[in-house]
Image (cartoon, helix red, strand yellow):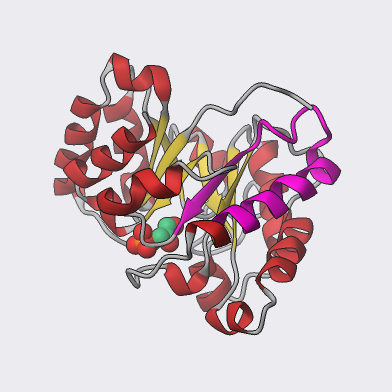
């Protein structure tokens, strides 16, 4: 077992929000991401694809990472409306969120597809942020751990490493609702993910893969969630759209 701890990562998922005027938000994040903060924590911003290249240019030299929210499995081809991992890389993105519950829910994405997309991300040199998490019904019927374990196994391909894989545990019922699991529940799920990572990335990387918590993370609850065992950062939706709030969550890591 490695005694090294992963470097924390705070990631902002802007979802389908943001116009060119939102570059001012990235300016604000950049301003707050000082050398002292950067020493302690990685910060990733995932805007809509329309802003990806502009954000990558704007973030150059700041140490901030920029990423996308989805990609196709193929590098190119007749897939109207889709974008490939190679295009994300070409636009200056370094990360891609995959298998978000909104993609699973509204676009019917399965573990097998998320797995293929993760392979594509790795092919293009991107780090995949693979999202997993149970629904309210699954939690209430005591199936949360089993669901998360099964999604993890199905969604993470061979060849994943602590460098090219981040896991985000996002209980579906906590996303955008203001509800969060108890710290004990978060700790239980993250420990289960950590345990199962050995089969996916091997024992050298098992403890180095970042496991993020996502779902209604706010400045007011960030310190408690981020202080939980095996929580190596956060995937933040709504609060990442406001520089001051996002930076307060980043500050909660320190
Ligand atoms: P909220 O932080 O708005 O609950 O969204 C979480 C999320 O889905 C991040 O990917």
Instruction: State the image coordinates of residue 66 (x, y, percent, origin top left).
Output: 40, 36
Residue 21 percent coordinates (x, y): 14, 47
> Does 75 sit left or right of 235 as displayed?
right
- In the rendered image, is residue 47 in sight? no
Residue 43 location, quadrant:
top left
**Quadrant for ligand 1?**
bottom left
Q: Is residue 84 visible?
A: yes
Query: Which of 124 and 40 lies nearest the eye of the viewer?
Result: 40
- The residue sitting at the front extreme is 184
- Pick the residue in front: 130 or 208: 208
* Residue 8 percent coordinates (x, y): 49, 32
Q: Based on the picture, tell me whether residue 189 belongs to the magenta stretch.
A: yes
- Where does the magenta region start and end? 186-214
Relative horizontal placement of residue 223, taking residue 145 as reference (left or right): left
**Residue found at x 45% / y 41%:** 227
Residue 32 appears at what percent x and percent y?
21, 28
Q: Nearer the viewer, residue 139 or 228?
A: 228
């Amino acid at each position: 077992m490695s005694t090294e701890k992963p470097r924390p990562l705070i990631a902002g998922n802007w979802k389908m929000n943001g116009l060119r005027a939102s570059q001012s938000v990235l300016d604000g994040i950049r301003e707050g991401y000082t050398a002292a903060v950067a020493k302690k924590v990685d910060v990733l911003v995932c805007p809509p694809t329309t802003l990806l290249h502009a954000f990558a240019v704007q973030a150059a030299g700041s140490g901030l990472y920029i990423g996308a929210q989805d990609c196709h499995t193929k590098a190119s081809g007749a897939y109207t409306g889709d974008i490939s991992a190679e295009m994300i890389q070409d636009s200056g993105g370094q990360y891609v969120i995959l298998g978000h519950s909104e993609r699973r829910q509204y676009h019917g994405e399965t573990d097998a597809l998320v797995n293929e997309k993760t392979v594509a991300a790795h092919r293009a040199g991107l780090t995949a942020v693979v999202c997993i998490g149970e629904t309210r019904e699954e939690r209430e019927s005591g199936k949360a751990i089993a669901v998360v374990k099964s999604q993890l196994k199905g969604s993470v391909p061979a060849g994943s490493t602590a460098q090219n894989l981040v896991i985000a545990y996002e209980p579906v019922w906590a996303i955008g609702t203001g509800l969060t699991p108890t710290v004990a529940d978060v700790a239980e799920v993250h420990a289960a993910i950590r345990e199962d990572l050995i089969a996916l990335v091997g024992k050298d990387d098992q403890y180095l893969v970042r496991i993020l918590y996502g779902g209604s993370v706010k400045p007011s609850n960030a310190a408690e969630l981020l202080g939980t065992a095996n929580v190596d950062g956060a995937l933040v939706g709504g609060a990442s759209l406001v520089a001051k709030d996002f930076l307060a969550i980043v500050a909660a890591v320190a």
